[in-house]
Amino acid sequence: MTLICKAENIDNDIAVLNKAAEIIRSGGLVAFPTETVYGLGGDGLDPKAAQKIYAAKGRPSDNPLILHISHTDELKPLVKEIPKSAEKLMERFWPGPLTLIFKKADIVPYEVTGGLDTVAIRFPQNSIARKFISLCGRPVAAPSANSSGRPSPTRASHVEFDLKGKIDMIIDGGHCEFGLESTIVDVSKDRPCLLRPGSVTVEMLEDMLGGIDIDKAVTSKLEAGERPKAPGMKYTHYSPSAKVIIVRGNEENVVNKINQLVSQTDKCLKTGVIASEETKDRYIADEVLVTGSRSNTAEIASNLFKMLRKCDHHNIDVVFAEGLPENELGLAIMNRLKKAAGYKIYDV
Ligand code: AMP
Ligand code: MG
């Protein structure tokens, strides 16, 4: 059975958070809100809890988990060294939507790191997440709380849909502020390298570090046989059941091309468009799902996964998504959209 409890305020809802922490300490699984997406938490130092997380998500066990901490002091025992570049990034972006990859200390089980000698660490900003992790008294291993391959959950109802009956508890803390998974930077090598774009943008990272390498898989599809730096990159991600196709270019061309593609689609299929506030009234598809204004990429990011999930609830067969320029937050949004689309893109 899965217990579902609301928690919006750390003082009023402390009993819920104590209960959740007790479940973690006794080896169970709890989904909890963060500022990025909901996480599926288990005891980060217990190999059995890690195995339970993989089983509940249906996630391949070579796709590593992120360890969540509630204070910077909790980092040291988990890693071999803290490079200068990491110190700078932590100072500026922790707590917040940035995960750092370090060389792992011996106490971190290989079950958590997918067999790697490195470990991913995040110090989230969300107050419910922080209080919950601190009450656990240990790092909390947590991937996104979705079934493997589905869009990440940004509402407790998304977690419930994917994982009810498979985990012990869901803490419902409302919707996630950023709505895209954390930015991941590998600081375990000589030069910091971006492995996953997120709400801490490349421009912000460059500003702090002077320069940063960007892994090829951030923007393009890996060729067959190519080994990704972040193991998660080789798996399909974020896909609704609908076929997703991206159309990018100037606004006028995008609208025209999408309407042309809709009109050419088999009439037995239900069509959808993932559109912006500015263009929503111009489409002829069966359903138009609006993520936000083109001038507000934060709004688009926070609604993207909800709209991908809506495609399934509305039984849409083919959905056309408006592309965005790949700078600032647009890079992270397009990274998720491209994966959802299996890199099917029209440039117009
Ligand atoms: P999720 O928590 O579902 O957003 O997935 C966590 C992602 O973090 C994984 O898919 C990996 O790509 C990445 N990750 C976690 N640990 C490591 C690591 N040690 N090295 C590289 N990437 C990692
Ligand atoms: Mg995930």
Image: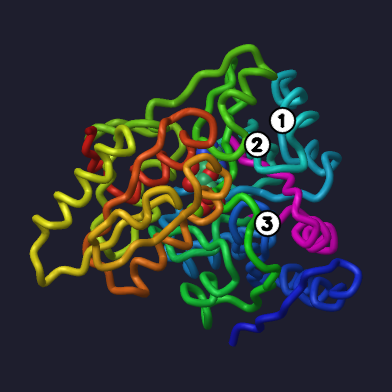
Mark 2 CB in 8 Å range of ligand 1?
yes
- Tell me residue 73's x, y (percent): 86, 40
Instruction: Give the extent of the magenta segment.
Output: 118-141
Which residue lies under the disc numbered 2?
A: 104
User: Looking at numbered disc 2 in the image, what kind of residue is underneath it?
Assistant: Lys
Farthest right residue?
Answer: 11
For marks 1 and 3, the one nearer the N-term is 3
| Residues at marks 1 and 3, CA–CA distance in whole angstroms | 27 Å
| Residues at marks 1 and 2, CA–CA distance in whole angstroms | 6 Å
Quadrant holding the C terminus: top left
Compared with 339, 85 (above or below) is: above
Which residue lies under the disc numbered 1?
A: 80
Compared with 149, 248 (above or below) is: above
Left or right of residue 35: residue 113: left
Which residue lies under the disc numbered 3?
A: 34
Q: Residue at x 66, y 83 (%)?
A: 3
Compared with 132, 257 (above or below) is: above
